[in-house]
Amino acid sequence: MCGIHGAVTFGEPLDLRRLAAARDRLAHRGPDDAGLWQSPDGRVVLTHRRLSVIDLSAGGHQPMLDADGRLAIVFNGEIYNFEALRTELAALGHAFRTRSDTEVLLAAWRAWGIDCVQRLNGMFAFAIHDGGDAGSPPRLHLVRDRVGKKPLYYRSDQAGLSFASELKALPGPHALDLRALNHYLALGYVPGAHCIAQGVRKLPPGHHATLDLRSGRLVVERYWTLPAHRPIAGMTVQDAADHAQALLEDSVRLRLVSDVPTGVLLSGGLDSSLIAALAARSGNGRIRTFTFGQPGSALDEAGRAAQVARHFDTEHHELTVDAPSLGLLERLQPLIDEPLADSSLIPSWLVCGLARTEVTVALGGDGGDELFGGYGDYAQALRDHRRIGRVPRPVLRALAGLAAALPAGVRGRNRLAALRGGAGEAIVWGSPYFDAALRRRILAPDALASLRASAPDAGGLLEPEAGLLALSDTGSGMIDAMTRTHFGSILPDDFLVKVDRASMAHALELRSPMLDYRLVEFAFRDVPEALKAGPAGTRLVQHELARRLLPAGADFSHKQGFSIPLDDWMRADGERLFERWSPKLPAPVERRELRALLDGLHAGRANGARLYALLVLAIASDNLARDFAPLA
């Protein structure tokens, strides 16, 4: 796991000292080594910060060139099947000088070009400079993994292109992008190719970009998408669990390959417990596990994590936080370049720091709920459909409109507002942050007018909801639509961003066995909806795996993960933090609404998530308006 960065110029020479300084803003991602390479014509520079995980020798140094110097690569991530690929490539005549997966990736590109990504099992964001030949122009290729586990930001204009693993490595200050702000307020994250910094884009998951270095033309294309849902007729939960278990066992085996110590982040939830179980059974010796505890909180799952750890005799480590304090958020300021309203970043950052004292690589449970119907939203949607499925849409819209007029945080407001499009669209309209009605209150009139004018085809103010509906439309049924919506939105743009930031802040490589593309494709293509959520219950495949692999009697009926009781924490620290940070909020945010949200919180309304989102936005806006400080 590493930090990558680079630049292309079509005019002025590149400043190598400035580029090296930008690279070193990613030193937290790769503390073990630093590298810089410039193309012979001086137009391209690739830089790298290395976290040594596979082949700890100097042979894994990056940027790495192939034997004749035509290809140069900087790579962030891991190719889990690199040993099998090495064998295949050696049979084709490729000679290897190192044991690193980077050299295997470079040889795979030499052999198969962009088609090599279809053979990769891993998490990755990489850039390859191809010097070209008489028949093909020099090019720069940018590639991101199928699911979006590793980030890649870029800026492209007439002067050139720059890219980086984190926004802080792209030169600032940055102006704020209003459309991205609208997305953030609606969703709590900035999705897809959008970026909070004006003029910067993110390469979406499953995409690659090619820059022709002669013409300057940049082309972005998709290379992978979820398979269509074609469920296997007659598949039982035992059948599905058999296949899922075999794939997951192999996925865990591959992700335990490392030249440094490994462990498991064990939240006490079902998916991380399954990963711990399979890691303990892998034959790799005694497993280290790490968790986060909040004594007295309803969200505390440390006891269940300890139960699983005892059952599998892991070397268990627990970090306990007794008193609520959002002051921890201010310690995370250097992490907050693009805002993320997911407050579980705080406990995730804490537990990753604990894990890094013992290991360099950890496995986590991300992805299982999207694959196998693990969220409560799915069961709730089925219940709602049975109750209100025949209620005319105009009636639901009218009720939702009445609810939306209520103050933020009033009990039941979000629940009714979410049903405006029927039960299947509740995850689109039921935002815990700022739905369309609340955005009309908190955004200044000129910002609202600009949104209507700048993105009419995308839905204007409703662009975030339109994006979710487009994902939902790819599903073949209600549950398939909901899981695809989550998989294509909150998973890559919130959950995976969170774990990347939390882990890489400590130079901890975090791997996600549930997101092995083979398991992803099986779950979305082959598994019937009724085995994910239906009359027989939810999470049927996960619960069958738990019956086989986890201690009898353990209760996995509640899903919390590494979470905090946000309303309580906000009541304890909210006034102090807002006094400090609210002046940093961007101009389009109406200050008068802040007081109403705070007053509502103290009156018992559920406004903690909204206020936390604004705090994070204020910190991010402050970072954008100046240049980022290096991560201490």
Image (spheres, rainbow, N blue to C red):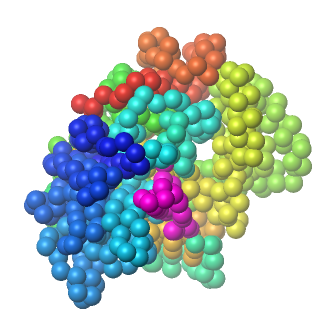
Residue 457 placement (x, y as % from top left)? 75, 46
Q: Is residue 489 left or right of residue 275?
A: right
Give the tally of numbered discs.
0
Magenta segment includes 211 = yes
Q: From this viewpoint, is residue 494 visible?
A: no
Residue 601 placement (x, y as % from top left)? 58, 19
State the residue at coordinates (34%, 66%). 130
Q: Quadrant of residue 111?
A: bottom left
Q: Nearer the viewer, residue 214 or 343?
A: 214
Q: Nearer the viewer, residue 161 or 429?
A: 161
State the residue at coordinates (45%, 24%). 625
Q: Quadrant of residue 413?
A: top right
Task: Tell me if residue 136 comes above or below residue 444 in the rendering.
Answer: below
Residue 163 placement (x, y as % from top left)? 39, 48
Q: Is residue 505 left or right of residue 337?
A: left
Quarter of the image that includes the C terminus: top left
State the residue at coordinates (32%, 48%). 5
Residue at the extreme left of the image, as rendered: 57
Q: Which residues are magenta?
A: 202-226
Residue 13 placement (x, y as % from top left)? 32, 43
Residue at the extreme bottom of the image, as rendered: 91
Q: Is residue 401 left or right of residue 304?
A: right
Task: Tell me if residue 100 comes above or below residue 213 in the rendering.
Answer: below
Task: Tell me if residue 580 comes above or below residue 152 in the rendering.
Answer: above
Magenta segment includes 414 = no
Q: From this viewpoint, is residue 393 visible?
A: yes
State the residue at coordinates (10%, 59%). 58
Quarter of the image that includes the N terminus: bottom left
